[in-house]
Image (cartoon, rainbow, N blue to C red):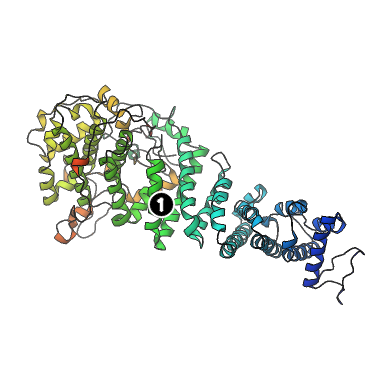
Amino acid sequence: MVKVQVSNKEESPVMDNGGYSDSQLVRHFRSVLDAVTTGDRGNYDELVSYLHLKRNLSPDEVAILVTTLKALSGAVSYIDSDHHASLLYAVSRMSLWNYGTEVMDALLELITSLAVSNGKYIDWCLEMLVKHFVPPFYIFDSLQTENGINKKNKVLSRVHAALKEIADLVPLAPLRLCPIVIQTMPSVFSNEREIVIYVENMLKLESGAIGETVGSTVLLALVDRLLELDVEIGWDGILQEDTRGIFDMELEDIIKFADEDENTHSMPQSELLNRKNLQGNKVVEKLDNLVVLALLHLESCQSSGRLAEVFDILLHSFQKTVLNAYKSKFTQFVMFYACALDPEGCGVKFAMVLADMFGSDVNPPITRMSAVAYLASYLSRAKFLSAALVTTIIQSLVDQCYAYCKLRDSDMNPRAHQVFYSGCQAIMYIMCFRMRSLMDVPRLRLQLLNMPMEAIWKHKLCPLKVCLPTVVVEFLRQAKAAKLFMASESFVFNDMLESDLSKAFGGMDRLDMFFPFDPCLLKKSESYIRPHFVRWSKVRTTYDDDDDNVSEVSESGSELTDDDFVDTNTKDMIDDDMMVTVEDLDFNPDLNKMSITPKNSLKHLRMPARIRPSTSPESL
C-alpha cells in the first residue's frame, strides 16, 4: 500500500512495506478530522490536498487519491460540515468523468457511505450523483468515439447503481431524489446535448429499480419540458396563408422528409420558404431529439409490460397541461404513439377520456372545445383505431348535439353556442376522413343512416353556416356521394375558406381551426409516427372512383405502402365476433347530465394556435 506521510505529533505503527493497513489509515483520518475541532489543521490541510482536481494523474497520484477516498469512507461519521467545509467542497469538485474506474469506485464508495451514515448529507450526496448525469463540457465531443461511449457507460452505470444502493439503505432517499432531479434538469435554453443526455438518465431512473417512487415525477417533468420547448416554436412569420382548402392538398403530398440532396424544384415557392425558415431551428431540433427519447422509452415500456402504467401517468399530465396549453404542436404525439403501441388498451382509453371531457359540463367550455378538437383529430388520423370505436363515438357526439338542439329554439349565435358548434365540426371532420370506410360496412352504414344528423344540420342554430366552411364543404360533398341524407343539396352553408362566423365560435385562439394531430413536423419523430398515421392524400373518399385510388392490399397481398390508409378493421367487421358494441367499450354517457351551454363566467384559458393541415410546413 502507498505510504501516506503523517506528522510526528501522532505515532502510528508502520507496516513492513512502509505503509499503513486499511484500519490504521481509517483511525488516522478520524483523528485528523477530529483534530480540526481543536484548531489543529496541519494534517487536515494535507489530507484535502490529496483530492486532486487535475484530470491526468500519474499512477502514484491515482494510488494516493484512491487510498485517501477509501480511508475517508471509513471515517465519514467524523465529517462535520461546520469544520470540514473545505473537504466537502473538494469532494464536490471531483467528477467521475475525469478518472479511471479505480477512482470512480472509491469516490462513489465515499458518497454512498456519507449518505448512509448521516441523514444530514443525504441531499448533498444525491445532488453529487445527479450532477454526473451530464458530463463536463469538454467531454461531450469525445462521447461520439468508442472510448467516449465506454466512458459514458462506465460512469452512468455506476451512478445509477449508487442511487439504487442509497435508496435500498435509506428508504426516504427516493422521495428526496425527486425534487433534486427536477431542479437540476437543464432549462429549455440549455445546450441540446446537455438536456438530451440528462433526459436519457431521467428515463433510466423511471424504468429502474426506484422508478416506482420517482417515475411519475420524472415523466411529468419531461412532458412539462417538452411543452415549454413546444410553445417556444412559433409560426409567426413562417406560415404563409393561402387560399387552398384544408382538404385540397396537405403539404405532405409535396414535401417529403428526405436527404439533404433532395430535388425540391417541384415545391411551391412559399413552401420552400417555410422549409428554409424552419431548418436549423435549434429549439425544433432539441424538441425533436427529446420526443424521440420519449417514444423509444414508450417502446421499452411496452416490451417490459409497463406501458399501461406509464400511459396513465402521461394521460394525467395531458389532461392537466397539454390539453389546455397554448400553441402545443408536437408534445401530443407522445400520447399518439403510446396509443399506437397499444390500440385496444391505451388507444381506446384516450378516445374515451377525450369524449368524456367533452360531454361533461363540469369542464370549462374552452377545455371541452379543446377536448373535442383533439378527439376529432385523433379519430381521423389514427390508423390503428377500429371502425366500430369511431362509429360509437360519432354516435355519442351526434346524440349530444341533437339533444342540445331539441332544448334550444334560438337562432344562430356562434359565441353563445361555442361548445355545440365545436361538437358539430368534430362530427364533420371525422366523417371527412372515415365516411367511406364506415359506409362500406353494412351495419355501420345502417347505424350512420339512423343517426339524427340531418336534423342537426337543418336546425335554426345553423351549424353548417358557422363551422369552418372548408370542413363543411368536404363533409357535404362526401355525404352527397354516399347518399347519407335524403337531400343534401338543400343544406345552406358558406362556400368560402373561412367566415366571420367560424372565427366567432373558434374564439380568440381559433379553435375552429385547431387540428392537433395534423402531420408531425419533427423530422426524426415523424419517422416513428408515420406507420400509424392517416394522411389525407391517402384517404378513400366516397366520391373517389376505385380505379383512381391508391393501391390497396388485395387478397393475394398486393402492394401497400406505410402512407396508404386502408381501414382493415372494416373488413373484420363482417364477422360478428369482431364487432365492438357500446357496451363493450363501457361508454354510456348520460345525456341528461350533459350540457353544451357555455359558462360565460369561466375565465378563458389560452389554447393552442391554429394550424391548418394545408399550410403547416411538413419538413424541417
Left or right: residue 572 compared with residue 605:
left
Please tell me which residue is depicted at 70% across the width and 59% down the height of the picture: 99
Circle 1 crowding by C-alpha within 10 Å: few under 14, some 14–19, many from 20: some
* Residue 357, percent from left and from top: 29, 42
- State the image coordinates of residue 77 (x, y, percent, origin top left): 72, 62
Whether 379 is drawn above or below 476: the answer is below
Q: State the residue lying farthest toward the left.
A: 486
Q: In the image, 114: left or right of 206?
A: right
Q: Report the front residue among 592 and 320.
A: 592
Which residue is nearer to you in this view: 618 or 453? 453
Q: Residue furthest top?
A: 500
Residue that mark 1 sits on: 313
Residue 141 falls left or right of residue 375: right
Task: Please identify the quadrant where the N terminus is shown.
Answer: bottom right
Amino acid at the residue labelled 1: Ile
For mark 1, give the secondary structure: helix
Task: Using residue 523 as the reference point, say whether residue 115 is left or right of it.
Answer: right
Residue 344, percent across and down? 28, 56
Residue lying at the far bottom in this picture: please name it. 16
Quarter the C terminus occupies: top left
